[in-house]
Image (spheres, rainbow, N blue to C red):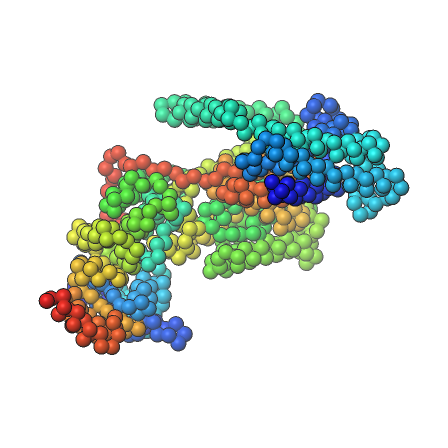
Amino acid sequence: MKNSIRQSIRTGVTFGIVHIFFILIAFNSMISVLIAKLSGIKNPGEIPAPKFYIAFTLLMGLWIGIAALNKKHSLSVGKKLLLSFTTSLTTGLMAGVLDVLLAIILVNKVFIRDFLTVLSFDFIKATLFGMTPVMGTIVTVLCFVAAGVAGGALTILNRTEAVQKFWKNIISWFKKQIEKIQYLSRGKYHLFWQIGGISLLALVAILLPMQWGSYWNYVFGTVGLYVILGLGLNIIVGLSGQLVLGYIAFFAIGAYTMALLNAPEPHNLMWGFWPALLLGVLLSALSGLLLGLPIMRLRGDYLAIVTLGFGEIIRILLKSDVLTNFTGGPRGIQNIKGPMFFGIPFNSEVDFVYLIFAGVILAGFVYNRLKQSRTGRAWLSIREDETVARATGVDTIKYKLLALAIGAAFAGLAGGIYASRNQFTGPDEHALMASINVLSLIIVGGMGNIPGTILGAFTLKGLPEILREFANFRLLAFGALLVFMMLSRPDGLIPSSRPKYDPPTEPAPEIDKKEATHGK
Amino acid sequence: MENSIIQVQGVSKIFGGLTAVNNVDLEVSKGSIYSIIGPNGAGKTTLFNCISGFYIPEHGTVLFQGEALNGRSTDAICSLGLSRTYQNIRLFSNLTAIENVMVGQHPRLRENWMDAVLNTKRCRQEEKISVAEGYKWLEFVGLSEFANAISGSLPYGAQRRLEIARALSSNPVLLLLDEPTAGMNPQETLEMTALIRSLRDQFNITIILIEHDMHVVMGISDQIAVLDFGNKIAEGKPAEIQKNERVIEAYLGPGGAALANKYRRKKAS
């Protein structure tokens, strides 16, 4: 028992540190705003009411109370409550000490925002729940203890048999519903569901962009472009297993082709959107091939470093003074003309969303067809074991180059549309971080499958826009998400599953004797 | 000469100061089962790697159906009709069993990426063929019920057989098996032996195998070569090899021949 208490105090200290960290980055403020919004208060302003700060503290306390009983099953109820009490008290005391320090800062009017930017006096007041320093500290400690004990009690309750059974029932009910849906979508209703689903999706995709306003069109357009990028990189990394880090360079080539051919400055060529898009795709594919030639012998880390260098070379070339007259230099290229569609200007925000959706569908279609073919299997075998793949008769160099070219072509497509939509492109849009973003989105979503890529693009590009409150913490949340993901779902949110092949029902057609090259 | 499928002529492979394979000649006749044996480190697998194109030998040539294999890449060699398995199993372990066998058919098929995107007739037909052929080979090695299982999760013996199925699916004329019964129990070993024999009898595939299990080697080989420290020290029919003093010495050390004779007498009496 003594041991358990010591352990619980240690847990409390850990949570205390977490709590202090949260306060120092004003995480409590953020959550309070969120709670205030959820409870229906519009525009809570910069700093929400104290009760929402209390709510945050209570939530922390609950978490601590629950965590304190983690892996403690064999103790009696009283002892369990004692443990959650000691843990939350420890954290509460640490939070109290922090409050006292904050109060001293507040009372003495010490200005420390140079070091800790969030610690404004208003923020400190709110953290002390708008009460006097002494009261605020006491309430903090009390909140922690009360919520902690409540959390402990809830955990105990949750572990009783009746409640466990209740959860099990709910889970099995959900599973049944999912099975029902799966049953309906197979068998003889398969076609019906497929057509219905596709037409419904098409309807939503056509109607929604007209309705939801330019902001959401922008957000979903960006997500769509990243889906195309993700699918392209998926061919290179997910299917053929080549870790290419400078992927955004191909995107840049597509974007700059569009920009140079369709902007008044610096060349005033004005080729129009479609030829430029096509040329951009072709040039990207070509650059994929050219990059591929020297790196064919490299694998793993070495490949990553070399391609990283390639990405930077392209960016720095675009930025360099030498090429300013040709590429616009660091200023980038402005006023890129939008597309025409059979003589009609096709360049409103809604139109671009349609265009991007069409691009996503095209990319997904090509990706899907390739994935389950001789080519796709050759790529997968290279990913699994390149030496053996080669000895099994796969021309690994040809297929690796093909993967690079097709993946790069996808990026070129996305780049062309992107430049045209933004009517601007500059070298800094194509920095290393963008490559890493694309790579993370396919890792988060799940390597090698389309739903995973879409989900990954939403998570990494859409969520930060939706959760504007998190803007300051985007990178923090990003990092935390990646760490969490790698721990809990190492294969991504939607892991790839292998296709199933049923045994043939009819005797297979004989292979053409002329085509079989050997076996005399 | 007329009847031989592969001729290894004076092949040497040198790693730094170590001569792993030293001036080895082999000639394997069509439709035979040819075993290469020898103590650990004798250079058997190195010789295999020289034949299948993994290594480029420093000296000598390999003629496969009259064509020199020197300098050809492994995929080109495989397309000529020579496939192999590996000492430690090297499946595409995250793919299913049938996908492994479908990759194995790669050199036989002609469908390219444009076919796949446009879903041409050739593509659909070849997909059908490769699934059917895949099932045929899985059936042959007794794995058709595991067709859609991830190959890395199959039991050890099944993985060995799947590797053979993958090698077979490219329709080879010559198959190199590197220790096909390593780590198997007596029952599995028996089944594997029967499988190898039926490969030759049913499909007329010539087989070269490396093996340590002397029951297997003596049971199925038509011809045996013995390597020791990179040199071929003996070649002949199983009965001849069993009596060869140099072979016994290589395995048991100097004076081993006398020891073996003593043992044989004891067994006889």
Q: Residue at x 73, y 23 (%)?
A: A41
Q: Nearer the viewer, residue A317 or A194?
A: A194
Task: Assign the C terminus of chain A to one quadrant of the image.
Answer: bottom left
Answer above or below: position of A39 versus B22: above
Task: Assign the N terminus of chain A to one quadrant of the image.
Answer: top right
**Residue reaching furthest to the left:** B269
Q: Is residue B43 left or right of residue A127?
A: left
Q: Residue at x 29, y 39 (%)?
A: B145
Residue B133: where, in percent of width, then height?
A: 27, 43
Can residue A263 be seen in the rendering of this structure?
Answer: no
Residue B8: where, in percent of width, then height?
A: 26, 68
Residue A83: where, in percent of width, then height?
A: 63, 36
Q: Residue at x 75, y 34 (%)?
A: A141
Q: Nearer the viewer, residue A283 or B76?
A: B76
Q: How many marks?
A: 0
Q: Nearer the viewer, residue A496 or A514?
A: A496
**Residue reaching furthest to the right:** A108
The quadrant in which residue B88 appears is bottom left
Q: Nearer the viewer, residue A93 or A448?
A: A93
Q: Residue at x 21, y 52 (%)?
A: B190
Residue B120: where, in percent of width, then height?
A: 36, 39
Can residue B39 be seen in the rendering of this structure?
Answer: yes
Q: Is residue A12 left or right of residue A225?
A: right
Q: Is residue A293 left or right of residue A224?
A: left
Q: Is residue B2 left or right of residue A460?
A: left
**Residue reaching furthest to the front:** A2
